[in-house]
Amino acid sequence: MSQTSTSAADGKTRCHWCSFAPEFPAYHDAEWGFPVADDHRLFEKLSLEGFQSGLSWRTILAKRENFRRAFLGFDFDRVARFTEKDVARLLRDEGIVRHRGKIEAVINNARRAREVVKQAGSLAAFIWSHEPDAKTLARPQTASTSAESIALSKELKKRGWKFVGPTTVYAFMQAMGLINDHAEDCCIRAKADKARKAFKRPGS
């Protein structure tokens, strides 16, 4: 997402993309850019970013609760056991994006996530081992990828994950707080930075 800023109706300056939809400010202020260590939330975001491919985040955010219900809270241990009957069920679910390839990717990725946990101890430990050096990303970025998102994307693909291209992974890293890409004058940037400094890195 863009890292320029804009003044909102409440007089506060936020990242410019907050002005694109009425649902965005609340998501921006409470979630985007704040570090996450919960495996299910990390898996959820990777999954939703995959569903977003070719669509808008507003579309996915509006359907997020439906996605959570359909994919059992993105508990990848349970999703990994989904069968073709579940795929058929999800393809009939009007509350989500009914795209066979993306649905099957979530199920596949759930199985791959279980493998990561066996090796790394948790999905969070694996993900956060790819956190960029803070010094190299001290200021908000304007690109849609980074060396780190490219590296993580390659590693995930090597492990058999799907719909995890470098742009998708970069958006995931922005949202899950692996970097602080709030605009420099955004009212939430300092709060996100404080949260990142206090955050205990999984596996550390």
Image (cartoon, helix red, strand yellow):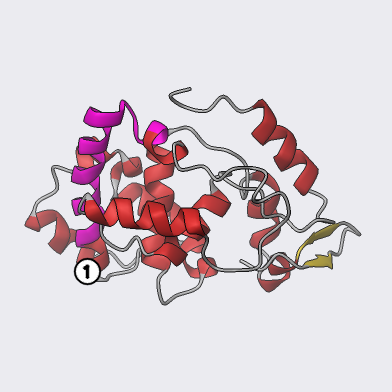
Residue 28: x and y, percent? 67, 53
Residue drawn at (43%, 24%) of the image? 203
Q: Is residue 24 above or below residue 56?
A: above
Closer to the camera in the image, 55 or 131: 131
Residue drawn at (82%, 68%) of the image? 6
Which residue matches tag 1?
Answer: 101
**Is 8 left or right of 72, judged from the image as shown?**
right
Residue drawn at (51%, 42%) of the image? 131
Magenta region: 104-125
Label 1 residue SS: helix
- How packed mark 1 is, by other alpha carbons closer than 10 Å (few <14, some 14-19, many 20 or more), is few
Residue drawn at (55%, 68%) of the image? 144
Q: Quadrant of the N terminus?
A: bottom right
Q: Is residue 107 magenta?
A: yes
Residue 162: x and y, percent? 26, 60
Residue 120: x and y, percent? 30, 29
**Is 71 left or right of 80, judged from the image as shown?**
right
Amino acid found under the numbered disc labelled 1: Gly
Residue 9: x and y, percent? 86, 64
